[in-house]
Image: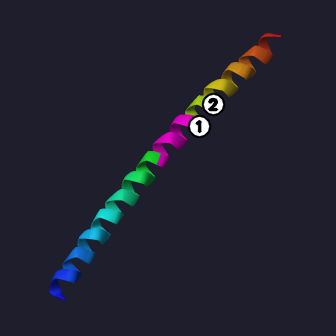
């Protein structure tokens, strides 16, 4: 019983670490995409101003 509870705690901890890393990765990708979109918008606005 004691051993089973220990392994469950290990799995839970590993799962939490996995979720945290996935969230960090998703946030990084989201920020990167947002930054690229802002660059595209700035280029577009600059292009429209030039016309």
Estimate how packed mark 1 is, as few (under 14), some (14 to 19) or many (20 or more) residues with alpha carbons within 10 Å: few
Marks 1 and 2 close (CB-CB < 8 Å): yes
Residue designated by label 1: 34
Q: Is residue 29 left or right of residue 51?
A: left
Stretch in magenta: 26-34
- Frontmost residue, 9 versus 25: 9
| Colour scheme | rainbow
Q: Name the residue rendered at 29%, 69% in the picture.
A: 11
Judged from the image, the secondary structure of the residue bearing numbered disc 2 is: helix
Q: Residue furthest top?
A: 50
Q: Main secondary structure of the magenta part?
A: helix
Q: Nearer the viewer, residue 14 or 38?
A: 14
Q: Is residue 24 left or right of residue 10?
A: right
Q: Residue furthest bottom?
A: 1
Q: Secondary structure at mark 1?
A: helix
> For residue 42, what is the image quadrant?
top right
- Where residue 24 appears, as percent x and y from the top left, is 41, 49
| 26 to 1, vertically: above or below | above
At horizontal 40% and vertical 59% (from top left) the residue drawn is 19
Q: Give the image location of residue 22, x and y in percent.
A: 42, 52
Q: Which residue is mark 2?
A: 38
- Give x and y (percent) for residue 1: 19, 89
> Is 50 rendered above or below residue 25?
above
Residue 30 included in the magenta stretch of the image: yes
């Amino acid at each position: 019983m004691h051993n089973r509870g220990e392994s469950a705690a290990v799995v839970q901890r590993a799962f939490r670490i996995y979720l945290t890393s996935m969230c960090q990765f998703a946030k990084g990708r989201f920020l990167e995409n947002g930054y690229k979109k802002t660059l595209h918008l700035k280029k577009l606005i600059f292009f429209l101003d030039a016309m």
